Amino acid sequence: MKICITLATYNGEKYLAQMLDSLVAQTRPADVIVAVDDGSKDSTCKILERYKDKLPLEITQFEKNRGHRAAFSTALEKAAALLEYDDLIFLADQDDIWLPNKLEVMSQKIGDSSMIFGDAEIINGEGVVTDSSWRKKAEIVEQLSQQALLTGYTNVTGCMVAFKAGLLKTALPIPQDVPVHDQWITLCATAENGYRAIADKVIQYRIHGNNAIGEGNKTWSEKLQTNLQWAKAVRGSEIFEKLPDESRQFLDKFILFLELRFNHAFLSPLWFPWIVKNARHIYPQVHSAPQMIARILFSFVGVSTAKKFFNKN
């Protein structure tokens, strides 16, 4: 079994050497590291070149910045040409620090699953541990239904993931309108042999002011718009036909649900049975009955009304 790491970089000179040092220190070394630089203007590419004697790096440089999704998509396409079905792919960000046994532990625990994901310590820009568990801090739900993933809600962070290379036959090419690549790969895993969480902490996840993707600061309406973009991208992709009838019907209804919220002040009471039936898929992060009741009731409020009367942006 080969292990391949895909790494996307962009102006990452501040932390990249620390990241690469943590790859050098792995108890089970990677067989290949596919690095794609997204048009960096700093010394990122020079740093990558310096590590070619220590790591099995294959480096591709974009002349112009094309975005995080495009960089990872290119890296995955290159990895697909090098690997067999049961080989493993790990996604890497330029500013994290991997714990030394990450590759060893995750390669031992993936089993028959298409994908697994671990936990992480959180560090700040100076490398100081600020929280012992990303999963607890971010209130990550360890397992989501396929329908929940279809809403755009996700519980997976790419830098904590390992998945079978065979999954790329379903995942590639990543649709242009998919906002985040790891979210797409997770959904693809549910159409194959599934995914699951493991308790092990596998990296130190760096949260700082310049994260390309992190805890995020989108407004409520922006998140709804992103969810709608995601749902439409899935419906327009080839994977849509691979989904069970129940999931396809749910996605069609969910898209209509969001479109109505953007275009009407309130939803019709006729939506009540569907919202109640699917509340656990639409709001998987809600655990208490009072909170769920409040979410269900607020589901009937349109975006314009929420902004005007409920201080939602």
Image: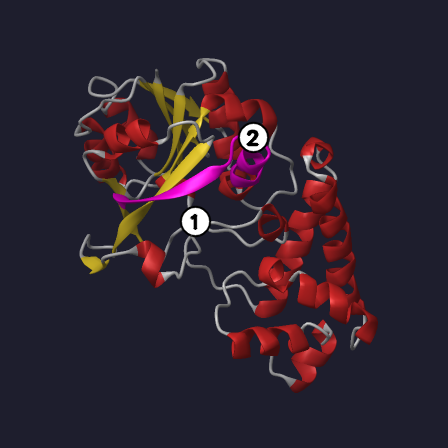
Q: Answer above or below: position of 169 versus 230.
A: above
Query: In the visual, does 182 lie left or right of 225?
Result: left
The answer to whether the residues at label 2 and label 1 have Cβ atoms under 8 Å apart is no
Is residue 199 rendered magenta in the image?
yes
Q: Amino acid at mark 2?
A: Glu
Q: Between 193 and 132, which is closer to the camera in this rendering?
A: 193
Identify the residue at image location x=29%, y=27%: 108
Chain part drawn in magenta: 185-203
Q: Give how far apart the Cα atoms at labels 2 and 1 are.
A: 29 Å
**Res. 161 image quadrant:** top left
**In this figure, which residue is indicated by the disc labeled 1?**
212
Q: Is residue 67 visible?
A: no
Q: Answer above or below: position of 291 versus 74.
A: below
How many numbered marks have been drawn onto this rendered protein structure?
Answer: 2
**Res. 300 image quadrant:** bottom right
Q: Position of residue 18 (x, y in %)?
A: 21, 39
Q: Answer above or below: position of 230 versus 187.
A: below
Query: In the visual, does 142 lie left or right of 301?
Result: left
Mark 2 crowdedness (10 Å alpha carbons): few <14, some 14-19, many ≥20? some
Q: Position of residue 266 (x, y in %)?
A: 78, 77
Q: Answer above or below: position of 291 versus 113.
A: below
Which SS class for mark 1? Answer: loop
**Res. 238 image quadrant:** top right
Identify the residue at image location x=57%, y=73%: 292
- Mark toward the start of the polypeptide (2 vs 1): 2
**In this figure, which residue is indicated by the disc labeled 2?**
192
Which SS class for mark 2? Answer: loop
Q: Position of residue 59 (x, y in %)?
A: 38, 22
